[in-house]
Amino acid sequence: MKNNMAIWGVVLAAIIGVGCFMKFGGGVSLSGNTDVKKSEQQPIAQAAVSTQKNKMSDKKETEPQTTESGETIFNVRDINSSMIGRTVTVVCKVGNVKKPKNTVFFDIQDANNIKHVIKGVLFNKTNQDNEGRQPLLEECAANRNSLYINGEVSSYNGQLEIKAWKVYTK
């Protein structure tokens, strides 16, 4: 009797093991269904590794980048009120470029998520020092290309902005 119970235990374990293999690695389920979806065939361990990679890549996107020269490149979403008065460089996209009178105003959008937006301003004196800045802003806005803006974080009417000094692409 004990031997029969042990044999049935082994048989049951083998059936469960084969069922899991077929569900996640084979192509046929125990019910004989050969149309097992690709997503159901992905091994559990591989799915766990994939999830871990996604978490790691998300973390990299939210942290500022550091160049070889030691310069920190921020995302727009990283800019906050504790940075007022600090010179920063952001990688971004721009939009809504306007030049009423002599000052250029524009939206600075996070390069990966355009929901994160702060204002940018390029004063006349800075623009005259290098007249290529405004056309570059307009071109990148029209083509939705990323660019780098170096300037001072400030606040105007309670809203964060960057007073741009340099505008460039790499």
Image (tube, rainbow, N blue to C red):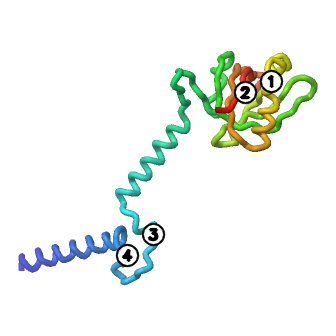
The picture places residue 34, in percent across and down from the top left corner, at 41, 81
* Label 3 sits on residue: 38
User: Depth check: 134 or 89 in front?
Assistant: 134
Q: Is residue 53 above or below residue 76?
A: below
Left or right of 26: which side holds 167? right
Q: Is residue 143 above or below residue 37?
A: above
The secondary structure type at the circle numbered 2 is strand
- Residue that appears at 69% across and 42% down: 114
CA separation in Å, label 1 and label 3: 52 Å
Residue type highlighted by circle 3: Lys
Q: Position of residue 9 (x, y in %)?
A: 16, 74
Element at label 1: strand
Q: Identify the residue under disc 1.
A: 122
Q: Earlier in the sequence, mark 2 or mark 1?
A: 1
Look at mark 2 in the image and give the residue it sits on. 167
Q: Which mark is residue 27?
A: 4
Q: Amino acid at mark 4?
A: Gly
- Residue 76 can be seen, yes or no: no
Q: Callout 3: few (<14), some (14-19), or many (20+) C-alpha neighbours within 10 Å?
A: few
